[in-house]
Image (cartoon, grey):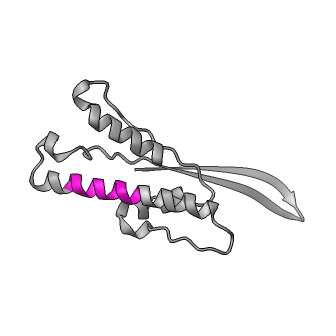
Amino acid sequence: FSVVFTQIKDMGEVAGKHVKAEKVSKINLVDLAGSERQSKTGATGDRLKEGANINKSLTTLGLVIHGLAEASKASAGKKTHIPYRDSTLTWILKENLGGNSKTFMISAISPANINYEETLSTLRYADRA
């Protein structure tokens, strides 16, 4: 879901006109739970499809973040393709990933030995992002 904050500041009279300044901030919270490995969860049917779609979105998100990092390193004249349209997640988050925005990721991990591989995979993904 999205939370939008709007701050309006009355700047008073400027050149005979009443002026207001507006700042808008938007926060998108995305829960990607369900991206676990199918063999561990035993998911079938719709849950399996949902998990596969989440994993595809995570892969695309990684590619978008990589593309944005490459674009920031590239020379001014060089264009870099950013694959926002390759998943619904990256299309929704497009304005939050590039431009004048700050983006951060919170990763939930488990200290249990049984979840070691999943935790390691999550930490590697977050580190790349």
Residue at 13% across, 55% down: 46
Above or below, 46 against 87 in this view is above
Tell me if 112 is positioned left or right of 98 in this view: left
Question: Measured from the top left, where is residue 115 in percent x and y?
Answer: 25, 31
Question: Measured from the top left, where is residue 24 in percent x and y?
Answer: 61, 54
Q: In the rendered image, which quarter is residue 89 located in?
A: bottom left
Q: Which residue lies furthest to the top in this view?
A: 112
Tell me if 111 is positioned left or right of 73 in this view: left
* In the image, residue 58 lies in the stretch drawn in magenta: yes
Q: Which residue lies furthest to the right in this view?
A: 15
Above or below, 27 against 14 in this view is above
* In the image, residue 53 lies in the stretch drawn in magenta: yes
Question: Measured from the top left, where is residue 71 in percent x and y?
Answer: 59, 64
Above or below, 35 against 59 in this view is above
Q: Nearer the viewer, residue 123 or 44?
A: 123
Tell me if 112 is positioned left or right of 78 in this view: left
Above or below, 52 against 125 in this view is below
Residue at 66% across, 53% down: 23
Q: Nearer the viewer, residue 18 or 103?
A: 103
* Magenta span main SS: helix
Residue at 49% across, 62% down: 94
Residue at 27% across, 36% down: 117
Tally the numbered discs.
0
Magenta range is 50-61
Question: Measured from the top left, where is residue 38 in percent x and y?
Answer: 16, 47
Q: In the rendered image, which quarter is residue 91 located in?
A: bottom left
